[in-house]
Amino acid sequence: MYYLYCIARSLVLILPRRCSYFIAGILSSIKFYISRRDRKAVIFNIAPLVENKKELRKRAKRVFNNFALYLVDFLNTSRINRKFIKRYVSVSGIDNLNSVVGKKGIIALTAHIGNYELGGGIVSILGYDIHAIAFPHKDRRINDFFNSQRSIFKVKVIPTGRAVVRCIRLLRNKKMIAFLGDRDFVSMKGYRVRFCGRDALLPKGPSFFALKTDSVIIPSFFVRERKYFYRLIFEPPIFPRYNNGSLKSEKVLVEEQLRILEKYVRKYSDQWYMFQKYWL
């Protein structure tokens, strides 16, 4: 798999973006038809999000296609710059982020939606110092490959094994850390919630760190709006305290996050990359 990533990156850097997208589209369709396990998992995961069940298979196929396009742009990081942002990226809610930068630690809560890897890079290019929790790949070479792509954007990676102490220190120093908040791939001991009408586990990290360090949660998403275009969205902050200064409970914080995550998973179900069965 490592060598496939290397070959793909070489091709993406040589070919025009439109050509890379065309090839990725063909390969994603092949993957959809030949990978029965992944196809069944995606259909299972998005079934609660699709009202017209006749469209379910088509929606699942779009998940594969969008994921392939996600990989193209992630492998193309050395070409992503302010010129790219000006042409292909629109930004919404930046004032929500600016209102807390430098005042408190920031937990950028996102999900496996759109192009979350590229989103962190775009935030960095825009001038914000950002760290990211990264779940390590089993193959060390693949892990190093992904981290080298992230380093091009100056996104600082925090390995999951060292996350707790380092995150607390960074947040207390008013830094920003990106968390994927829709699934806990590490402990699988998250909060059990009703998510889109089904039972699911949400990771404890965002709520734990917000309460531990008095940090603000900013729901942030980088979604594909049209084939070649993205939108970077910052939702209003979720504060760990009520207006009277008292701390919220973990349950309240989780419910506030859940409402935002559910909104985006429903709206961008064809960009929600869950290739393992999600619902409990």
Image: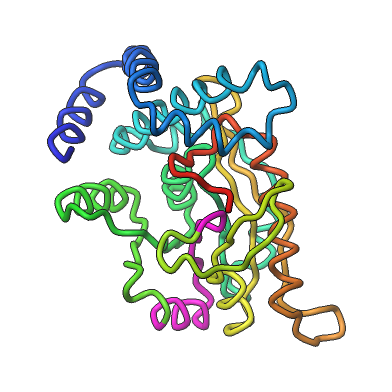
In reply to whether residue 178 is colored magenta, the answer given is yes
Left or right position of 78 against 25? left
Left or right position of 54 against 57? right
Between 38 and 115, which is closer to the camera in this rendering? 38
Q: Position of residue 173 (x, y in %)?
A: 49, 81
Q: How is the image coloured?
A: rainbow
- The residue located at (15%, 28%) in the rendering is 7
Q: Position of residue 222 (x, y in %)?
A: 55, 41
Q: Position of residue 74 (x, y in %)?
A: 35, 37
- The residue located at (49%, 72%) in the rendering is 175
Left or right position of 270 against 93? left
Q: Vertically, is 25 above or below 107?
A: above
Q: Vertically, is 24 above or below 169?
A: above
Read off the magenta span.
Answer: 165-183
- The residue located at (23%, 53%) in the rendering is 143
In reply to whether residue 66 is colored magenta, the answer given is no
Q: Vertically, is 58 above or below 67?
A: above
